[in-house]
């Protein structure tokens, strides 16, 4: 059984979670160029590697971030979005 | 008596033709038959949807509850209310309060939130299907329906678990009583009938079944 750890509710089977897509820092829409904004909106990087992803624990609707190696399907860690927000965004 | 509320489990309970009573203007099954006591000791499933409950969430919810003199439990745990009932902490800033049949706290919170509209506090409607599982076979039922190991919990620490049960998102709250550990369960009311039927099928296999509230309420085991 695949498992994932919610920062609030603990370790649970993957069936309790919903994948929310890759987390990507949004550029400031007030100053960003049209090209950079279009790249943010339309383009995705599908190359495998260490990525930050949105996941939701469906039973509690807790959204959080998972750092995951998509090449090996290994979770590095999971944490709340606050950690990114207080650091000023992910690179 | 104007019974304007209706349990999400009303129709499935009515099919078993119980003796009816009322809690908070909601018809509730008081007794199904003379076997209620036996089933309650083995594996009883009772509908407690009639108890008054209300929720709130938001960054200001903790400070607002403290200002009302309500105890704040730790994340993923619950506490007893001074006037009877319980407060469950469903996340960092989300709470659900449920009154005992004669309690007033949840109802008072609902009234205050409707008038005050405090900053950073948002009311959450809870029209849940609320169940109680009793008896010695509760853990056997939980093992068949959940992927969470409830045996690892210490009910004395008043834990609360948000998980799935037969595919339904549920809040489960183990309660230590003199008769052993009972489990309170809440889920979205629209899943109530499915959950009731599924749990009842399993309960029948374990020599249990539906029980009315006569035993629970009269003996003060609703929490």
Image: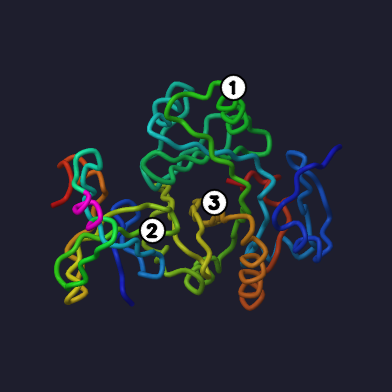
User: What residue sits 29% from the left and 65% below the top?
Assistant: A4
Image mark 1: chain? B
Q: Does residue B208 appear left or right of residue A79 in this picture?
A: right
Return the residue at label 3. B178
Mark 2 packing: few (<14 Cα in 10 Å), some, or many (20+)? Answer: many
Mark 1–mark 3 distance (CA, rounded to whole Å): 40 Å
Across and down, in percent, residue B208 comes to: 66, 70
Give SS at disc 2: strand
Q: Are marks 1 and 2 in contact (CB under 8 Å)?
A: no
Q: Are marks 1 and 3 on the same chain?
A: yes
Q: Main secondary structure of the magenta part?
A: helix
Between B177 and B206, the one nearer to me in the picture: B206
Return the residue at label 1. B115
Give SS at disc 1: helix
User: What residue sits 65% from the left and 75% below the top?
Assistant: B201
- Range covered by the magenta-colored residues: A34-39
Q: Are marks 1 and 2 on the same chain?
A: no
Task: Decide whether residue B217 is among the magenta residues.
Answer: no
Image mark 2: chain? A
Image mark 3: chain? B
Mark 3 packing: few (<14 Cα in 10 Å), some, or many (20+)? Answer: few
Viewport quadrant of the N terminus of chain B: top right
User: What residue sits 67% from the left and 64% below the top?
Assistant: B193
Q: Which mark is residue B95?
A: none
Give SS at disc 3: loop
Return the residue at label 2. A57
Residue closest to the far right: B1
Q: Are marks 3 and 2 on the same chain?
A: no
Q: Is residue B192 above or below residue B128?
A: below
């Amino acid at each position: 059984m695949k498992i994932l750890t919610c920062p609030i509710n603990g370790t649970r089977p993957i069936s309790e979670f919903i994948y929310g897509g890759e987390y990507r820092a949004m550029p400031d829409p007030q100053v960003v160029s049209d090209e950079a904004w279009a790249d943010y909106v339309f383009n995705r990087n599908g190359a495998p590697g260490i990525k930050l992803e949105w996941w939701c624990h469906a039973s509690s609707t807790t959204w959080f971030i998972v750092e995951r190696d998509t090449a090996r399907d290994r979770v590095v860690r999971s944490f709340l979005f606050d950690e990114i927000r207080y650091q000023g965004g992910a690179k | 008596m104007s019974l304007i509320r209706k349990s999400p489990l009303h129709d499935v309970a009515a099919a078993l033709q119980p003796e009816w009573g009322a809690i908070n203007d909601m018809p509730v099954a008081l007794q199904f038959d003379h076997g209620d006591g036996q089933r309650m000791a083995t594996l009883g499933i009772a509908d407690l949807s009639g108890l008054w409950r209300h929720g709130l969430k938001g960054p200001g919810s903790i400070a607002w509850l403290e200002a009302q003199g309500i105890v704040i439990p730790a994340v993923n745990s619950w506490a007893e209310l001074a006037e009877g009932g319980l407060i469950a902490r469903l996340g960092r800033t989300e709470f659900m309060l449920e009154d005992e049949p004669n309690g007033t706290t949840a109802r008072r919170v609902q009234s205050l939130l409707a008038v005050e509209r405090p900053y950073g506090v948002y009311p959450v409607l809870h029209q849940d299907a609320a169940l109680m599982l009793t008896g010695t076979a509760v853990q056997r039922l939980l093992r068949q329906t959940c992927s969470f190991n409830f045996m690892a919990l210490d009910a004395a620490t008043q834990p609360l678990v948000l998980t799935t049960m037969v595919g339904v998102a549920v809040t489960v709250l183990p309660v230590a009583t003199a008769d052993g550990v009972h489990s309170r369960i809440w889920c979205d009311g629209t899943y109530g009938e499915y959950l009731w039927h599924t749990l009842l099928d399993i309960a029948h296999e374990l020599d249990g079944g539906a029980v009315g509230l006569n035993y629970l309420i009269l003996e003060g085991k609703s929490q």
